[in-house]
Amino acid sequence: MSATSFIFFGLMLIPFIAFIVWLIKQDKKRNYLGLAVLLAAIVVAVIVAIYVDAKYMKLQ
């Protein structure tokens, strides 16, 4: 992993996961809003990762 990956994990991913866990724990009615947000974020992240990777591979 490059330094950029470590910066991403340390500064963005870990706080985001902590926020989602906190959001899920705050949901007393168990509406599962946090899980819906997490699922949407995962889908967007996968789509962006695939798009960026495909674009990068075309440049090589």
Image (cartoon, helix red, strand yellow):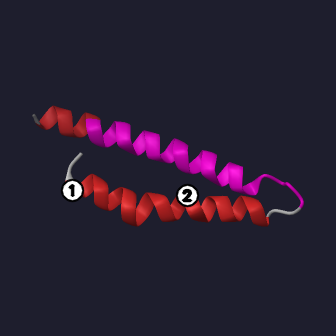
Q: Is residue 30 magenta?
A: yes
Q: Which quadrant would the N terminus be assigned to in this image?
A: top left
View extreme (right): residue: 29
In the rendered view, would you say 51 is above or below 18? above
- In front: 48, or 31? 31
Circle 1 sits in a helix, a strand or a loop, which is it? helix
Contact, CB < 8 Å: mark 2 with mark 1?
Answer: no
What is the magenta range? Answer: 29-53
Left or right: where does residue 4 sit relative to residue 9? Answer: left
Left or right: where does residue 10 sit relative to residue 35? Answer: left
Q: Position of residue 19 (x, y in %)?
A: 60, 65
Amino acid type at circle 2 is: Ile
Q: Position of residue 47 (x, y in %)?
A: 44, 40
Amino acid type at circle 1 is: Ala
User: How many angstroms separate mark 2 from mark 1 (CA)?
Assistant: 20 Å
Q: Is residue 56 magenta?
A: no
Left or right: where does residue 53 sit relative to residue 36? Answer: left
Q: Residue at x 78, y 52 (%)?
A: 32
Q: Residue at x 70, y 50 (%)?
A: 35
Mark 2 or mark 1: which comes first in sequence?
1
The crowding category of the residue bearing disc 1, from other C-alpha atoms within 10 Å (few below 14, some 14 to 19, many at least 20), is: few
In the rendered view, would you say 36 is above or below 27? above
Q: Which mark is residue 17?
A: 2
- In front: 29, or 43? 29
- In front: 15, or 49? 15
On the image, numbered disc 1 is attached to which residue?
A: 3
Q: Residue at x 38, y 56 (%)?
A: 9
- In front: 49, or 23? 23
The crowding category of the residue bearing disc 2, from other C-alpha atoms within 10 Å (few below 14, some 14 to 19, many at least 20), is: few
